[in-house]
Image (cartoon, grey):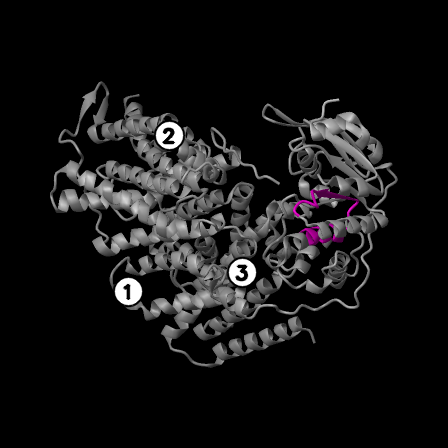
Amino acid sequence: MDFFLQLLFTGIGIGAVYALVALGFVLIFRATSVVNFAQGEFSMVAAYLMVVFAVDLGWPYWVAFLISIAGMALLGAVFNLTVYYPLRNRSFLPVLISTIGASIFLSNSVLALYGPQPQVLPGWLETPGFQLGPVYLDSQYLIIIGVTLVLVGFQYWLFERTLLGKKLQATSQDKEMATLLGIPVAEMIMITFVYSAVLGGIAGILVAPVLFVSIQMGSTIALKAFAATIIGGFGDIAGAILGGFAIGVIETFGAAYISVPFKDAFAFLVLILFLIVRPQGIFGERVAEKA
Amino acid sequence: MSRSAIGQLVYALLAASLVALTATVKTDGYVANILMQAATYAIAVFGLSIVLGLCGQINLAQAAFFALGAYAVALGTVDHQLPFWLCLVGGMTLALAAGAALGLSTLRLGGHYLAMVTISFQQILTVVLINATGFTHGPDGVSSIPRPTGFTSVQAFLALVVAILASSGYLVWRLADTRLGRAMRAVRDNELAASANGIDIFRTKLIAFALAALLAGLGGGLFAGGFSYISPDQFAFADSIVLLTMALLGGASSPVGAAIGTGLLILIPEWLRFLKSVPGLYLAVYGLAVILIVIFMPDGIWGYLGKLFQARERERPKPAEQLTLHPVDSGAPMALEVRGLRKNFGGLKAVDGVDLQVRRGGVHALIGPNGSGKTTTLNVVTGLYRASDGAIFVDGVDVTALPAHKRTVAGLARTFQNIRLFRSMTALENVVVGAERDGNALIKGGRSALWRRAQAALDFVGLGHRVDERIPSFTYGHQRLIEIARALAANPTVLLLDEPAAGLNLSEKKALHDLLGRIAAQGLTILLIDHDMTLVAGAARHVTVLNFGRRIADGETADVLRQPDVAAAYLGVSE
C-alpha cells in the first residue's frame, strides 16, 4: 500500500506536466483547428534556456526563469508567423506537416548548438523533500502539482471571467463570425500561440529537474500529452488535464509493475485502446460538418 | 495511337533500359549503395504517393512498415533459414496487416488522430525492436542476410530491385486513373461529395493505407537483402519523416514526383556530407526544408513542373451520344417516400414528423422559409445525418438503416447547396465518378462506355466543349451544372437538387428551368428545394411546404401556393 501511494504521487506529478503540455495542444487546436506537433519542443527549448541561464551563466533561478519564459513568448510569436500564418488558408494537412518540420528543426538546432550530452538542471528548492506518513514527497513534484493547479485556475479565470478570454473563445468557435463582430482574429491567434508556448515552456522547466534535459524530452512529452488529449476528448480543456494525470499514473504503474524498458509504450497502447473502444474520449469531441 | 499508350510505351522502354544499365554497367560499392538505398526507399515513397498523394491521408509510420518487411526477411532467412522470396511475401503481408489494423482503428476519425496513431505505432515498434532482444537481436541488428539464388551479387540484386521499382511505379501511376484511384482522389478532394456519389469513404481510405504499408514492406524486404545488415536505428521516426519529405518534395500525387524526391534527398545529403560533422545540423536543415516546401511548393517539384505543361488532352470519346436516363422502376407507386421523419439536434427538433410522397416522374418541390428543415430533411434522406425516427423508402426499398454511399447505390443522387465538386479533377473526371455508381445499369462495355456517358452528361448540361478543364476555372453557375451532370451520369432513380437556382443570374435561371424540363421529360423523378417561386411554380407539379420542421401543406402546386397559411409562413401575412 505504501509503495502504491508513493507511485500514485509520482504519477500525478509527472501527469501534471503532461496536462500542461496537453493544455497548450488544446488551446492551439481550438484556435486554429491545427494540431501543433512542435508543442513538445517548446518544453525542450525552455529547459535548455534554463540550463544556459541558471547553470552555465549562474544567474539566480527566478531571473533565469523569467528570461526563459520571455524567450518562449518570443518563440511562440515567431512560430506563429513562420509556421502557421503563411498556411492559414490551406487545409489542415499542410499545416500539420509544417509543424512536424518545425519540431524537427527546433530539436536538431538545439542538438547542433548544444551537443548530444544530456544536461542536469537543479530543482527550484534546496530541500529535496519530506516524509508524510508512508509517502516521501519530493519537493519538485510538489512544485509541479502546485504550479499546474495555479495555471489551471488562471486559465479558468481568463476564459470565463475576462473579455479577452471571451474573444479567444469566440475566435476558436467561429473565426468568420468573430471577424464580423470586430474581434481581431489574427491577434487572438497570436496570443494563443504565445500563451501555448509559455505553458509548454513552464512544463519543460518544471519537469527538467526530474528528467534529464535532452533533445528527446520534447517529443516524448508531446506524444504523451497528445495521448492525454485524445483520452480526455479532443479539444476539451478539462479532458486534457484529466487525461494528462491519467497517462502519468498509468505509465508510472506500468513501469513499476510490468516492465521498465517498455514504460514509454504504455501511453501509446492505452491511446490505441481508447481509439478503438471510445474514440470520442471521456468527454467527447464534437465533430460535425455542414452539408 | 493515344497519348496514354505512347506514354506507357515510353515508360516501358525507359524502365527496360534502366534495368539493363544497372545489370551491365559496373559501379563501385559506394555508388551501388546509394542506388540501392534510393531504389528501395523509392518503393516505400510510392506507398506515400497512394495514401498521401491520391487519398490525402497522412502516414507518419512508413519507416515502421519498411522495418516490418526488412525484419521479416532478415529474421526469416538468418534465424529460420526460410527462402528469401517466402520471407519477402511474408513481410509484405505483415506490413499490409499492420497497416489495415491501424487504419481500422483510426480512419473513421479525423486526420490528427491518424497522425498520432501512426507516430505511436512507429514508437512502439522501435521500442520492441530494441528491447525484444531474444527475438529481434536488439540494438545490434541482424547481419549476414542472404540474397536469393540468381541474384547473390550486389549488381544482379540491384537490377532486380530496379525492375521491381519500375513495375510498382507503373502500377501506382496507372492507379490514379482507375475506379479505385478516382475514388481516392474524390475522398481527398471532398469527403461528403464522395459519399454522396456512392463511394465508401472508409473502405477507400483503408485500401489506400494498407497498399501504402504493403509497398513499404516490399521496399524494406529488398533493403534488407541489398545491404545484408539491418538495425533498429535505420527505421526510426526520423526516417519516416525523411520518407514523407521525399514524397512532399517531389510531389506527393505522382510516382514520378516520388522518384524525383527520393533521388534528390538521397543525393543531396551525400553532397552535403559536411553538414553531418555537426550532429543535428543535417536534420535541422531537413526540418526547415519541410516547412519551406509546404509553404512555397505545395505540389512538389513534379507538381510545379506539371503546371507549366498543363492542359493535357484526353482521349475524346467519339462519336458523341445522347444522354439517356433510365430510372429503375420496380413498380412501387412512389419513387421516394418518407414516413414520420424526425431529426433532433439536442433539444432542437429540426425535422419533426415529416411525411413526403414523391410520385414517379416529374418534379416535386420542397419549400419553406429559412430554417424550416428542408436541407436537414434532404441530409437525412441521403444519409449524411441519421434519422432520429421514421423511415425512408427509395423505389419501395427501405434505406433508413443504410449509410450514405449505399443510398446512392440504391438510387439516390444529389447536389449540394454549397457546391461540392472534386476540385483537383477535370469536369469529365468529376462526372465519371458519378457515372461509376454501383447499381448504374447503363454502364456496360467497361471503360469507354463510362467516359462516353460522362461526356454525354456534360453535353446535356451544355458544357461538353470544356470537359478537360479543372473545376476552379469554371464560373459558379457552370459549377452547379457540372454537379447536376455528375448526378445525372449516375442514372439515379430520384434526383435531389438542393437550391440549384441559388446564386444564378436571370439567364442562368432560365437555362436551369429548361434543363429541369428536359430531365423530367425523360421520366426521371426530381425532388427540388428552392426559394425561387417562379422556378418552383413553373417546374413542379407537386409541392410540400415545411415550417418549423413540420409539414404544413402538400398537394398540387397551384392549390398549395394559394393556401393562406403557406403565404403566411412565407411572407408573414396574418389572415
Name the residue beneath numbered marker 2. A163
Pointer 3 indicates a residue of which chain?
B
Distance from Cα at disc 2 to Cα at disc 3: 46 Å
Q: Which residues are magenta?
A: B480-503
* Tag 2: amino acid: Leu
Pointer 2 indicates a residue of which chain?
A
Name the residue beneath numbered marker 1. B275
Is residue B271 positioned above or below B532 on the image?
Answer: below
Could you tell me which residue is drawn at 17 percent across and 34 percent down?
A: A124
Q: Is residue A218 left or right of residue B151?
A: left
Q: Quadrant of the N terminus of chain B?
A: bottom right
Residue B21, x across and y down, in percent: 49, 79
Q: Is residue A18 left or right of residue B342?
A: left
Could you tell me which residue is drawn at 58 percent across and 64 percent down?
A: B173
- Secondary structure of residue under mark 3: loop
Q: Residues within 10 Å of mark 2 (few under 14, many from 20)?
A: few
Is residue A130 positioned above or below A79 on the image?
Answer: above
Residue B149 visible? The answer is: no
The image quadrant of residue B531 is top right
Query: What number is the disc on residue B54?
Result: none
Distance from Cα at disc 3 to Cα at disc 1: 30 Å
Is residue B355 positioned above or below B26 on the image?
Answer: above
- Secondary structure of residue under mark 1: helix
Query: What number is the disc on residue B253?
Result: 3
